[in-house]
Amino acid sequence: QVQLVESGGGSVQTGGSLRLSCAASRFPFSIASMSWHRQAPGKERELVALITTTGVATNYADSVKGRFTISRDNAKNSVYLQMNSLKPEDTAVYYCRGYYGGNFYWGQGTQVTVSS
């Protein structure tokens, strides 16, 4: 059974930083596209950042460009999201997602709370 486990969430003040991690197991990580998504209370889940299998190509939501960086380490079966200059509107549950073989796989999410 595929497992994607996020960690690194927490509470920070405006302008602070957090680094989220997502560890994959029983999953062909090195040939899967990976992405981070978030869902704030009362809102739909949205794409935050995406990274291709080799990490050469990335894509970001306009709201996080220049502040967030997605990266991956295929040797560790892990994908990361470095979040800097955090704002209260970044408050959400952050989810890791993997795409392989026509299927999407989700982690359980990690809460990020940014206070003003």
Image: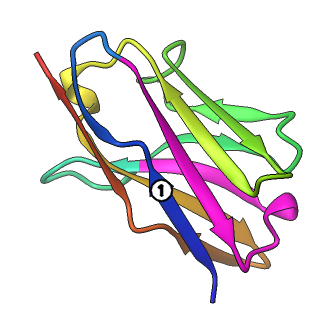
109 with respect to 99 (left or right): left
Q: Residue at x 68, y 73 (%)?
A: 25
What span is in magenta?
17-37
Per the image, is 116 magenta? no
The kind of secondary structure the magenta stretch mainly shows is: strand
Say if 9 sits above or below 68 in the image: below
Type of amino acid at the residue the image marks with label 1: Glu
Q: Position of residue 76 (x, y in %)?
A: 77, 53
Say if 43 sits above or below 103 in the image: above
Q: Residue at x 54, y 46 (%)?
A: 21
18 with respect to 72 (left or right): left
Its colouring scheme is rainbow
Q: Nearer the viewer, residue 25 or 100?
A: 25
Q: Quadrant of the N terminus?
A: bottom right
Q: Nearer the viewer, residue 38 or 71?
A: 71
Q: Position of residue 84 (x, y in %)?
A: 44, 16
Picture quarter containing residue 72?
top right
Say if 46 sits above or below 64 in the image: below
Q: Position of residue 8 (x, y in %)?
A: 42, 42
Q: Quadrant of the C terminus?
A: top left
Residue count near mark 1 (Cα–Cα under 10 Å), binned few <14, some 14–19, many ≥20: many
Q: Residue at x 87, y 34 (%)?
A: 56
8 with respect to 59 (left or right): left
Mark 1 residue element:
strand
Mark 1 sits on what residue?
Answer: 6
Q: Position of residue 63 (x, y in %)?
A: 41, 23
Q: Residue at x 32, y 19 (%)?
A: 86
